[in-house]
Structures are given as structure tokens and as C-alpha cells.
Amino acid sequence: MGVVHKRKGESPFWQWEGVAIERYGAEGASATKQVLIGEADGAPNFALRYFTIPVGQASNLDHHAHDHGVLIVHGRARVLLGERYEEVSAGDVVYVAGWERHQFVNIGDEPLTFLCIVPSKTAQPDVCAVPARKTEPEAK
């Protein structure tokens, strides 16, 4: 059965009814994450998350097996994708491929907020797995 979480709060500090606000990031960071749709809502295949990154802070520097779809809602960021940086702002969309190193750095003068869609935890491959390396056949 479908679920609706009504938005409350003013931009850029959006919150949703029935959605917990979780601390996100390194020790001492004040970034937050809200899981708007996920397994707790009966969504078996994906999670929709809303992140808020304060001025001068950044998301975690990550790389993992699953890919991401990101929509910048408010603010400006410098995003690391692999080894390159791109500047993005409200309305821009970012695709992060599986195992691609990535990070969103708030470079604006207001909070950076973005929606991020990822596979659900049960739909993800083993996120701790390292991609297999091809090895040379053993000499006989």
C-alpha cells in the first residue's frame, strides 16, 4: 500500500510528517538525512533520501557498489565524481555510478539540500564487496 508523508517546515529546512531527522556525516558535522521513502514504507526496491549540508560542510567522501540519482533542491555545491569536480546548483541532476568516488561540498551561502535515490538495502549487492580483479592464468 502506498504512503504519503506531508511536507512541513519552510525552505530550505523541509521536514516531513512521520520521517525522522538523522545526523549525517563525520563526528561534529551538523548535516542531516531524512529517509522519505524506504523499506519502512514498504518500498522494496529503492530509497528516497533528503540531505541538508550546512554552509562550508560536505557529504561523506564515499564509494560503494550502488549508483545514485541526485537532484539539487537548494544551494550550490562542488561535486566530486571520480577524479573530476563539477559545480551544480538548484535544479541540476547528478548521476553517480557504482564504485565512483563522490562527495558534495556546499560552496554557497545557504544550506545545500538534495534528494538522493538509491537501491534499497535489500536490493543492493554486497556493498562491502570489492570488484573482482582479473588475474593472469597460472603458468604451467
Image: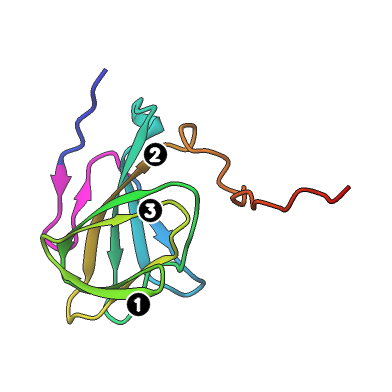
Q: Name which of mark 3 and mark 2 comes first in the sequence.
A: 3
Mark on residue 97?
3
Q: Residues within 10 Å of mark 3 (few under 14, many from 20)?
A: some
Q: Which residue is mark 2?
A: 119
Q: Foreground: 14 or 135?
A: 135
Q: Secondary structure at mark 1?
A: loop
Picture quadrant of residue 70: bottom left
- Amino acid type at circle 3 is Ala
In the current view of this chain or complex, which residue is farthest to the front?
140
Picture quadrant of residue 46: top left
Task: Report the magenta stretch's main SS.
Answer: loop
- Amino acid type at circle 2 is Pro
Q: Is residue 79 above or below residue 130?
A: below
Q: Foreground: 28 or 55?
A: 55
Q: Answer whether labels 3 and 2 touch (C-beta < 8 Å).
A: no
Q: Is residue 8 magenta?
A: yes
Q: Where residue 98 sits: x, y (%)?
A: 43, 51
Q: Is residue 38 magenta?
A: no
Q: Where residue 77 sits: x, y (%)?
A: 24, 73
Whole-Å distance between the Cαs marked 1 and 2? 25 Å
Q: Where residue 65 sits: x, y (%)?
A: 49, 48
Q: Which residues are magenta?
A: 7-19
Q: Residue at x 53, y 38 (%)?
A: 125
Picture quadrant of residue 36: top left
Whole-Å distance between the Cαs marked 1 and 3? 23 Å
Q: Is residue 21 above or below residue 37?
A: below
Q: Is residue 84 above or below residue 113?
A: below
Whole-Å distance between the Cαs marked 3 and 2? 12 Å
- Amino acid type at circle 1 is Gln
